[in-house]
Amino acid sequence: MKIIPLHDITDYFDAQTPTQTITFSIAMDDPGFVLTDGGVPMTGYSVLRGLRVWVDDVYLKKFDNPGNLISDGDVEGATSGMSDEPKTDCIWYFKNLTSFIDPFNTCTTLDDSNNPPTILAKTEAYLTSVDRKSGSRAIELKLPGIHYSSCTSYDFITPLDPITPDDGEVISVAVDFDYRDFLGCDDLTTNLTGTNLFVSFPDEPYSDSNGDPITLTDGKFYIDRDITLSSNNSLNNPDNLIIEGAR
C-alpha cells in the first residue's frame, strides 16, 4: 500500500483560474512488477487478476453552507454515458485510457472466454448500477485481468487518447468545479501561497500630486473598508468592473 501524506486541498488549487479538477484513478508505479493471471510469484512481484473501483457520493463542502461544490457529486444527474470531456448531461468524464500490447502479442482480457482469446485488454470507465453507495448509479473504473498466455505482466502499457501521464495512471475519471465557493476571505487574501490572487485596495488619496485621478488597471483587490465608486465613463461600462463577494 502506498501511503500519501495529507495536505490542505488548497495546496493543489491553481488560484489563477476558477476551474479546478478532481480526478480518481487506478495507477501502477511499477507495472513490470505486476504479473498477469498464471504468473509465477517471485520476490518483489505481485500477481493481479484485474481491479475494479467504484466512485460515488463525492462531496466538497462550500465555505459558508453545506452545499456541494460538485454539482453532480452523487452521480444521479448523469443521463448519458461518459465521454472524454464534460457534457451538460454528464459532467463526469474519463481520462488516461490504456490498452496493453507487448512487442509480440496483443494482451487479451480475462473477460474473453474464447479459445484462443482475441479481445484486447484495455481499461474502461463508465456509469454503473451494479455497485454504489447510494441512489441508482455510480462510476466504475476497470483495470482488466490479462491472460498469462498473451502477456506476462502489466508492463506493456500502450496509451490511447490522451497519453498516459508519468505517474502511472492507467484509467481516470474527472469532474470540474468552480473552487471559489470553497474559500473564505482569508484564503483569498493570504492563504493561497504565492498566487497574489487579490491584493489590498490602495489607501487614499486616489489622485496624484496634480489632483488627477489615479487609474487602477488589471487589478484584483480585496476591500476591507468603505469606498465610493463614482459614476464615470469607465465604470459605466460593465466590462470594466467585476465585484465578487465572500464571507
Image: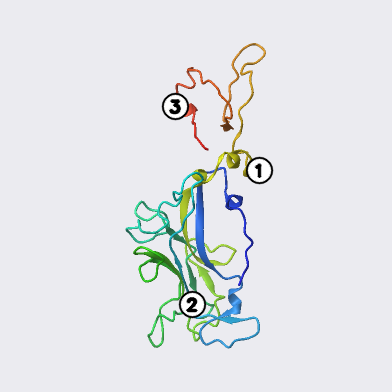
Judge from the rendering whether residue 196 lies leftward or rightward of residue 98; answer left or right: right
Q: Residue furthest front?
A: 65
Which picture quadrant has residue 120?
Answer: bottom left
Quick one: SS at disc 2?
loop
Q: Nearer the viewer, residue 112 or 245?
A: 245
Residue at horizontal 65%, vertical 11%?
210
Look at the picture and state if 73 lies above or below 37. Answer: above
Nearest to N terminus: mark 3 or mark 1? 1
Residue with the most extreme right position: 209
- Estimate the x, y position of residue 222 in percent, counting from the top left: 58, 32
Q: Is residue 43 left or right of residue 178?
A: right
Foreground of the two, 97 or 92? 92
Residue 194 numbered mark, or none: 1
Q: Is residue 18 visible?
A: no
Comparing 103 with 85, the one in front is 85
Examine the rendered structure and indicate whether residue 227 appears above or below residue 146.
Answer: above
- The percent coordinates of residue 103 (x first, y second) are 54, 77
Residue type highlighted by circle 1: Gly
State the separation of the CA atoms marked 3 and 1: 30 Å
Mark 2 and mark 3: span between their CA atoms? 56 Å
Q: Count residues near mark 1 (Cα–Cα under 10 Å), then give few for <14, some for 14-19, many for 20+.
A: few
For residue 63, which numbered disc appears in the image? none
Q: Are marks 2 and 1 in contact (CB under 8 Å)?
A: no
Rendered residue at 65%/16% (across/down): 208
Q: In which quadrant of the rendered view does residue 219 lie?
A: top right
Q: Earlier in the sequence, mark 2 or mark 3?
A: 2
Give the distance between the C-alpha atoms of the residues marked 2 and 1, in whole angstroms: 42 Å
Q: Which residue is mark 3?
A: 238
The residue wearing badge 2 is 50
| Colouring scheme applied when the structure was drawn | rainbow
98 w.r.t. 247: above or below: below
**Residue drawn at (60%, 40%) of the image:** 186
